């Protein structure tokens, strides 16, 4: 039985459970009729934990069903290239996420998110022009409307010119 998928799924489950227990300590200050900012992390992390547990159990069951039927064959050149491409995507998306996190304070949430989503879908290999134009716009507008208007979560506005530009968005 290959242990890789089961170990990876277990690590993901432990991470989500850790974050769930950490989010239970969020202090909520809200007005009457508002859901509050602590509700969403708890809801999303609970769902992610449940789905991760299902994924872990299904990978364990698949591993038991296969047993020792699999023989070790050398990987084909196509599978090696596919793994290398997947590894590069993970590395590039991690770098893009770190850049997004560190630059958001200076350029503001709206501009940083717009550029991040654009860069991320390019990293994933999307080349259709209409997707490259509309996806970043729709994702950014959706997040701004939902989180700033309905849940009342403030976003970083940026510094200097970017702060002034952010005033147009929210």
Image (cartoon, rainbow, N blue to C red):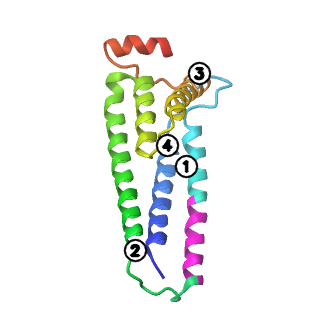
Residue at which label 4 appears: 25
Side of 152 relative to 119 (left or right): right
Per the model, the C-alpha gap separating discs 3 and 4 is 24 Å
Percent of width and height locating residue 126: 48, 42
| Residue 136 against residue 58 in the figure, above or below | above
Q: Secondary structure at mark 4?
A: loop
Count of numbered circles in the view: 4
Percent of width and height locating residue 41: 54, 42
Q: Which residues are magenta?
A: 52-65
| Residue 76 against residue 20 in the figure, above or below | below
> Could you tell which of marks 1 and 3 lies nearer the N-terminus?
1
Give the class, few, some or many, for how many residues have Cα within 10 Å of label 1's Cα (few <14, many ≥20). some
| Residue 150 against residue 72 in the figure, above or below | above
> Could you tell which of marks 1 and 4 lies nearer the N-terminus?
4
> Could you tell which of marks 4 and 2 lies nearer the N-terminus?
4
Does the stretch in magenta take in 84? no
Give yes or no for contact between labels 1 and 2 (Cβ–Cβ under 8 Å). Answer: no
Residue at which label 1 appears: 45
Give yes or no for contact between labels 3 and 4 (Cβ–Cβ under 8 Å). Answer: no
Q: Nearer the viewer, residue 2 or 33?
A: 2
Give yes or no for contact between labels 2 and 3 (Cβ–Cβ under 8 Å). Answer: no
Give the class, few, some or many, for how many residues have Cα within 10 Å of label 4's Cα (few <14, many ≥20). few
2 vs 3, front mark: 2
> Could you tell which of marks 3 and 4 lies nearer the N-terminus?
4
Percent of width and height locating residue 7: 44, 70
């Amino acid at each position: 039985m290959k242990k890789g998928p089961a170990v990876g799924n277990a690590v993901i489950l432990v991470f989500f459970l850790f974050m769930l227990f950490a989010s239970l300590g969020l202090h909520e200050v809200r007005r009457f009729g508002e859901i509050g900012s602590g509700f969403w992390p708890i809801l999303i992390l609970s769902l992610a934990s449940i789905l991760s547990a299902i994924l872990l159990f299904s990978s364990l069951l698949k591993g038991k069903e296969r047993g020792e039927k699999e023989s070790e064959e050398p990987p084909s050149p196509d599978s090696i290239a596919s793994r290398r491409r997947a590894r590069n995507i993970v590395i590039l998306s991690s770098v893009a996420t770190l850049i997004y996190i560190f630059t958001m304070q200076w350029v503001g949430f709206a501009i940083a998110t717009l550029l991040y989503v654009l860069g991320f879908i390019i990293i994933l290999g999307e080349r259709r022009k209409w997707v490259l134009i509309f996806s970043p716009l729709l994702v950014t507008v959706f997040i701004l409307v939902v989180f700033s208007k309905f849940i009342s979560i403030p976003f970083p506005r940026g510094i200097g010119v970017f702060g002034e530009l952010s005033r147009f968005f929210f």
